[in-house]
Image (cartoon, rainbow, N blue to C red):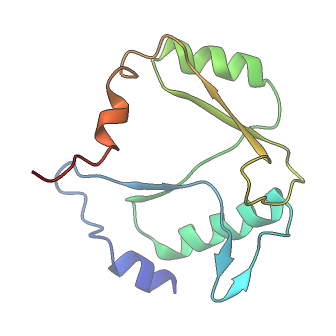
């Protein structure tokens, strides 16, 4: 599986190109991981990404303390925001298990919805 993952993405870093950042792992090889705690899912995700050995597949690190200071740093760097989730939480399909905390002064927020909105065909 990891090699297949890496081979489906061009892992060359010769020129700037998009990357993929993973922050959670819900299924692996047909196994449903949603009822496992976040810390267990992230541990398996980190191993999977390391084994893929592709610099364009990134693991989203997490912090367990200093959330307010971390958010202040995110804002000072003009980033969009952070996602907060309890470390022992299980995945909930209704999206109630996590919280997205947005930087209200994020300079690229305006007009972003247009990138994700389908335009009607003429």
Q: Which residue is drawn at 66% across and 77% down?
A: 27
Q: Position of residue 45 (x, y in %)?
A: 65, 67
Q: Where is residue 69 in the image (x, y as percent from the top left)?
A: 72, 16
Decide which of 16, 114 is in the foreground and name it.
114
Tell me if 17 is positioned left or right of 61 in this view: left
Tell me if 20 is positioned left or right of 68 in this view: left
5, above or below 91, in the image: below
Q: Residue at x 36, y 54 (%)?
A: 19
Q: Where is residue 97 in the image (x, y as percent from the top left)?
A: 80, 48
Decide which of 49, 88 is in the foreground and name it.
88
50, above or below 39, in the image: below
Decide which of 99, 20 is in the foreground and name it.
99
Q: Position of residue 106 (x, y in %)?
A: 45, 17
Decide which of 14, 73 is in the foreground and name it.
73
Number of labels in the image equals 0
Residue 63 falls in image quadrant: top right
- Residue at the farthest right position: 88
Q: Which residue is drawn at 68% across and 69% down?
A: 26
1, above or below 49, in the image: below
Tell me if 112 is positioned left or right of 28 in this view: left
- Residue at the farthest front position: 122
Tell me if 2 is positioned left or right of 11 in this view: right
13, above or below 72, in the image: below
Q: Which residue is drawn at 62% across and 32% down?
A: 82
């Amino acid at each position: 599986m990891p090699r297949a993952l890496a081979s489906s993405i061009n892992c060359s870093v010769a020129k700037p190109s998009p990357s993929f950042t993973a922050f959670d792992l819900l299924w692996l090889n047909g196994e449903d991981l949603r009822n496992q705690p976040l810390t267990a899912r992230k541990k398996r995700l980190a191993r999977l990404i390391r084994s893929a050995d592709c610099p364009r597949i990134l693991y989203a690190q997490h912090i367990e303390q200093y959330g307010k200071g971390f958010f202040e740093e995110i804002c000072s760097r003009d980033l969009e925001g952070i996602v907060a989730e309890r470390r022992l939480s299980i995945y909930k399909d209704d999206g109630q298990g996590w919280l997205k905390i947005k930087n209200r002064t994020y300079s690229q927020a305006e007009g972003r919805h247009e990138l994700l909105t389908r335009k009607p065909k003429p």
